[in-house]
Image (cartoon, grey):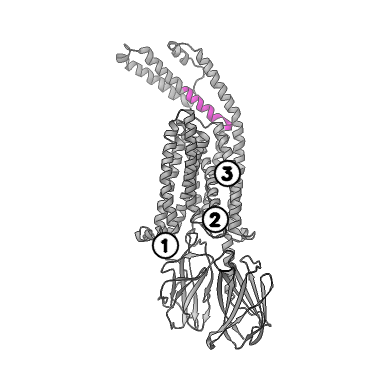
């Protein structure tokens, strides 16, 4: 049986590796979760005078190092001075040397988003007039992405290890409760612990290079490791290692003292204690992901983190338990096969896990997408659709498994009747001295594949008997012969039981359906891992909207000469993100009509306590000229008779206040008149 099952496991392992390689390829540093929503000067802009500083606005808070913002002249020399600083909300700036000559300059940035993912890129602007530049604007290191791929694969292995360890242990504790027959599942659970521990250590070493240079040589740089330990992600990985030590103790007790406990009451008490301890350790391990990734930032983080923990625990109970069931079905000894009650208990746990996944997954999808359009228009939404499709298929296969589980009841009844009949016949059997005749005349001959084994066994037994004649015949010849015949009979019984078990179509059908579930689960886990490394749909759409608005710093709407300025803002408070739009008509010297519109990132108008506008012409030292528009409707303010005294490159400053204490000023330059 072992030779026929091994290829199936090899197929499953190959599927595991293929899915990981396919889905994790390219999931390196480019899969960012924060995006640049604005810059000053803007991308491709041509300014008359050298700016005093360069500023970038991101879609969320980011972490910066001394070299996170670099400004390079046409020859590739750095012209920035000092360290990057947070000037307001999610806007970061770095000062420049004064008196920079004309030409094209490159701004390169490399930061870490609040949910632990690196963000890198570059763009150019020009002073005076564009020129040739020798600087590459890729914004990435010369590394070929090996570190990013290794980091993504490490994340996949860590997820798989957690699911195997936590789900397998839960299966043993809540479903199977066997003694010696649990040994294959013990190896399964221990392999999950080893995989998670190794992956966590690897992620700690890879983290510094992954968020920095991306070079393989920097993986073992201890100075980078020290910096990683001071970050949120480093703290989460270290916490995971500490909790894995507690998990090792839990596993030792589960497969040691618990396995050997005979007294029913003591075993129930130990089961309760292990259940509480196991849930605490598993929840702590799940929290090490929730506290450093998607759930820890953005909308309703206080609710999202416990929901994420619950989601991971449900995944482990379902998929990890499924893997343990598969191992038990294929690897359990013939005399202790996985029984129907164990499969039935797991079926109930899996059903509850699926309901939990539906509830928590719906909340997470709403939080990360924000709109129905993001489901099809963003990579995150497309991956989520693929994940949902796999879950639906897997639930369908699970339903088939549930039907096979129900049919096992009939098989279990037949087996129980056979055991009772055997015990009844055995009670009236002949004495030990006649066993030889009974065994030799047994009409239930072994199968062809086993006859050789049994014949050899008998031959060896006869040989042993002849050999031992000199030593044992004078002592206990009848006892020795009876023991040999008893061993032969036990071998026949085990082989017969194994044939019956393997010939059972219901058990065979259950094995095949569970194997199919496990194969789908491997691909599902790979899709989920890539999903956690992909920019959420909500963030991607907000970044696209803000970038589009920023790119159109000024737009001429035709003959009317009206000017429209779109400026994203973030006051840093609750509900503090949005876009403010200034319409100036006819945008010329003299009287102008001004309209101000404030919208959320999703395009909906909303009111804020205060909006103020100022116009400054720095070239002529005019201004600031304040304008306080009147509130007209939801998200709409207006002012008439706005005086523009002179044509030129005017700086338009808009102050937005979203609460009593949350306020920010955003600026744009525009040619007026």
Q: CA distance from mark 3 to mark 2?
A: 22 Å
Q: CA distance from mark 1 to mark 3?
A: 38 Å
Q: CA distance from mark 1 to mark 2?
A: 33 Å
In this rendering, the label closer to the viewer, 1 or 2: 2
- Give the labeled residue for mark 3: 353
Asked if 434 appears above or below 352 in the picture, the reply is above
- Give the labeled residue for mark 2: 302
Q: Are marks 1 and 2 in contact (CB under 8 Å)?
A: no
Under circle 3, the secondary element is helix
Under circle 2, the secondary element is helix
Is the residue marked by circle 2 packed among few (<14), some (14-19), or many (20+) residues within 10 Å? Answer: few
- Give the labeled residue for mark 1: 214
Range of residues picked out in magenta: 492-506
Instruction: Tell me, yes or no, whether the highlighted magenta stretch contains residue 324.
Output: no
Q: Could you tell whether 199 is left or right of 340 in the image?
A: left
Upstream in sequence: badge 1 or badge 2: 1
- On the question of residue 447 being in view, the answer is no
Upstream in sequence: badge 3 or badge 2: 2
Q: Could you tell whether 569 is left or right of 141 in the image?
A: right
Q: Could you tell whether 249 is left or right of 366 in the image?
A: left
> Which residue lies at the image location 31% right of the left edge and 11% below the top edge?
474
Under circle 1, the secondary element is loop
Is the residue marked by circle 3 packed among few (<14), some (14-19), or many (20+) residues within 10 Å? Answer: many
In this rendering, the label closer to the viewer, 1 or 3: 3
Of residues 95 and 629, the one drawn nearer to the viewer in this rendering: 629
Upstream in sequence: badge 1 or badge 3: 1
Q: Are marks 1 and 3 in contact (CB under 8 Å)?
A: no
């Amino acid at each position: 049986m072992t030779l026929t099952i091994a290829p199936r496991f090899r197929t499953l392992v190959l599927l595991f590796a293929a899915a990981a390689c396919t889905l994790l390829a390219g999931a390196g540093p480019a899969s960012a979760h924060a995006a640049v929503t604005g810059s000053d000067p803007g991308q491709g802009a041509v300014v008359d005078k050298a700016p005093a500083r360069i500023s970038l606005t991101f879609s969320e808070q980011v972490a910066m190092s001394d070299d996170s913002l670099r400004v390079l002249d046409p020859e590739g020399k750095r012209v920035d001075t000092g360290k990057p600083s947070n000037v307001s909300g999610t806007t970061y700036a770095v000062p420049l040397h004064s008196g920079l000559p004309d030409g094209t300059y490159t701004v390169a940035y490399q930061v870490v988003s609040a949910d632990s993912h690196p963000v890198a890129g570059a763009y150019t602007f020009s002073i005076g007039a564009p020129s040739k530049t020798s600087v590459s604007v890729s914004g990435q290191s010369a590394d070929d992405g090996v570190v990013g791929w290794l980091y993504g694969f490490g994340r996949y292995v860590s997820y798989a290890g957690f699911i195997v360890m936590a789900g397998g242990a839960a299966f043993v504790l809540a479903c199977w409760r066997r003694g010696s027959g649990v040994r294959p599942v013990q190896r399964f659970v221990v392999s999950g612990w080893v995989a998670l521990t190794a992956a966590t250590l690897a992620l700690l070493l890879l983290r510094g290079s992954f968020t920095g240079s991306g070079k393989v040589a920097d993986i073992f740089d201890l100075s980078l490791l020290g910096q990683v330990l001071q970050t949120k992600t480093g703290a989460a990985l270290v916490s995971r290692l500490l909790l894995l030590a507690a998990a090792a103790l839990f596993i030792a007790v589960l497969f040691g003292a618990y396995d050997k406990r005979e007294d029913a009451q003591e075993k129930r008490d130990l089961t309760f204690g292990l259940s509480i301890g196991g849930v605490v350790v598993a929840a702590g391990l799940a929290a090490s992901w929730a506290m450093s990734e998607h759930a820890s930032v953005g909308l309703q983080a206080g609710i999202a983190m416990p929901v994420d923990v619950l989601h991971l625990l449900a995944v482990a109970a379902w998929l990890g338990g499924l893997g343990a069931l598969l191992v038990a079905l294929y690897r359990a000894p013939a005399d202790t096969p996985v029984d129907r009650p164990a499969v039935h208990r797991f079926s109930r746990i899996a059903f509850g896990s699926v309901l939990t996944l539906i509830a928590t997954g719906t909340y997470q999808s709403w939080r990360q997408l924000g709109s129905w359009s993001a489901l099809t228009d963003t990579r995150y939404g497309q991956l989520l659709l693929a994940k949902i499709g796999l879950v639906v298929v897997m639930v369908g296969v699970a339903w088939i498994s549930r039907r096979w589980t129900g049919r096992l009841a009939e098989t279990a009844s037949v087996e129980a009747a056979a055991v009772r009949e055997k015990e009844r016949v055995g009670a009236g059997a002949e004495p030990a001295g006649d066993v030889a005749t009974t065994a030799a005349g047994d009409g239930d001959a072994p199968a062809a594949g086993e006859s050789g084994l049994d014949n050899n066994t008998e031959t060896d037994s006869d040989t042993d008997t002849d050999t031992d004649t000199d030593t044992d015949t004078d002592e206990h010849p009848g006892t020795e012969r009876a023991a040999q015949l008893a061993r032969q009979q036990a071998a026949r019984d085990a082989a017969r039981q194994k044939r019956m078990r393997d010939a059972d179509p219901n058990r065979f059908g259950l094995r095949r359906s569970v194997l199919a579930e496990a194969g789908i689960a491997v691909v599902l886990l790979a899709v989920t891992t890539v999903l956690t490394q992909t920019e959420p749909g909500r963030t991607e759409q907000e970044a696209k909207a803000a970038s589009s608005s920023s790119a159109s710093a000024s737009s001429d709407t035709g003959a009317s000469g009206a000017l429209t300025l779109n400026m994203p803002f973030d006051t840093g408070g609750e509900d503090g993100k949005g876009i403010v739009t200034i319409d100036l008509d006819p945008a010329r010297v003299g009287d102008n009509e001004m309209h101000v519109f404030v919208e959320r990132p999703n395009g909906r108008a909303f009111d804020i306590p205060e909006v103020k506008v100022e116009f400054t012409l720095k070239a002529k030292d005019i201004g600031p000229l304040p304008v306080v528009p009147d509130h007209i409707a939801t998200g709409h303010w207006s002012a008439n008779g706005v005086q523009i005294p002179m044509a030129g490159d005017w700086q338009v400053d808009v102050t937005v206040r979203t609460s009593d204490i949350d306020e920010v000023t955003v600026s744009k330059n525009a040619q007026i008149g």
